[in-house]
Image (cartoon, grey):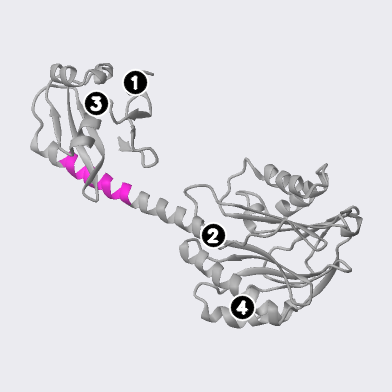
Amino acid sequence: AVVDQRDRAMVRTFPSFPLDESETGRAYVPVSTRLPVTWVIEHGDILHLPTLEIIDERFPAALVLRDTHTRSCLCVPIIVNEEPIGALNFAFPDEGPVADDVLAYATTAATLVGHAVERAWLYEHEYDTAHTLQRALLPIIAAEHDHLSVLAHYRPALRNHDVGGDWYDVFALPDGDYAIVVGDVVGHDISAATTMGHLQSAVRLYAAETPDPDTLLNRLDRAVTSIPGALCTTMFYGTFHPGNGRLTYSCAGHLPPLLVTPDGTDWLNQALGAPLGVGSARTTAHADMPVGAHLLLYTDGLIETKGTVIDDSLARLATDATDLNTTDPAAWCQQILDRRSGHDQFDDIVLMCITRIDTTARTD
């Protein structure tokens, strides 16, 4: 039994035998329930109950133990940071005292469990901290810009899987164009989120001076050698011209964005290069975004599925994007994510939908 860290008024039990649906047969029981394990958690002392009569007298709620042929029990505390956070209860089919070797085994087992629980809590804390940091570093992007509608989603990986360094960004450039960024840092911990923050800042700094995608990526190739953990980051960088809808882009090892127009889909894979810092020559390519076109940018968590070839996942994404019966960017983006639900998610997902809108049709 272990105290629930999200609701410390409850204790989660892990019986090694089947229990009924009585108060003590539930996975969670209140700390206030009079049970041997809750007493030990409250007092932090070893508890030995040598007879069934004593068990019945002191802990009436533990009568369910009769069904397991228990006649005596030994309960030892699980200690973490000098605090009892749980208990191990050993049930015996005979009444009487506990042998010294059994007591030694029980206390050793409780100590090992305490170490395991502490490591699990530390991992969970680091996981939550990393995601909190990652969310804090992601920019708050306005829903609408000049000729653009922007929707960005971040979905963390399933619990017990690692946090990544995924990020996205859209911001205005000095010449009136817009920069569009999506990237993924190698690594899975707080340092990956920190590296992502450094790269995001570097992109904004360089973009103000060198908006050309290939030039910017070349500068980042040199910069990543001095940013811990940044080597081999994948990234897409593009600039959008509001006047004519022209998108100029370059890609450093990142999965190609998908352009969806009334005429179909087109993978933007004409300016692909190696991840940052690998030494690949950078090129640029162009694509035209007609009014109403959607540009779908994402990280690999969206399309990586256990047992599925990546080309098949990309093909499925293109099919999903064209099958959706909505032109609303928010609904379109959400449906893409909904179709991804139900699959094991082993990595964080960044999904950004950028739609070219006709601002001339607006009325004040």
Q: Which residues are magenta?
A: 105-118
Q: Residues within 10 Å of mark 3 (few under 14, many from 20)?
A: many
Please tell me whether mark 3 sits on a helix, a strand or a loop.
Answer: loop
What separation in Å lies between label 1 and label 4 (alpha carbons)? 61 Å
Q: Is residue 76 left or right of residue 176?
A: left
Instruction: Give residue 290's position: percent from left, percent from top.
Output: 89, 60
Callout 2 amino acid: Ala
Q: Residues within 10 Å of mark 4 (few under 14, many from 20)?
A: some
Q: Is residue 224 left or right of residue 124?
A: right
The reply to whether callout 2 and callout 4 are in contact (CB within 8 Å) is no
Quarter where residue 198 is shown: bottom right
Please tell me whether mark 1 sits on a helix, a strand or a loop.
Answer: helix
Q: Nearer the viewer, mark 2 or mark 4?
A: 2
Q: Which mark is residue 35?
A: 3
Which residue appears at 32% of the width and 47% of the height? 117
Q: Nearer the viewer, mark 3 or mark 4?
A: 3
Callout 3 amino acid: Leu
Which residue appears at 21% of the width and 31% of the height? 39
Q: Which mark is residue 278?
A: 4
Q: Nearer the viewer, mark 2 or mark 1?
A: 2
| 298 is within the stretch colored magenta | no
Task: Please give the residue where the numbered disc 1 appears in the rendered image.
Answer: 23
Task: Please give the residue where the numbered disc 2 appears in the rendered image.
Answer: 136
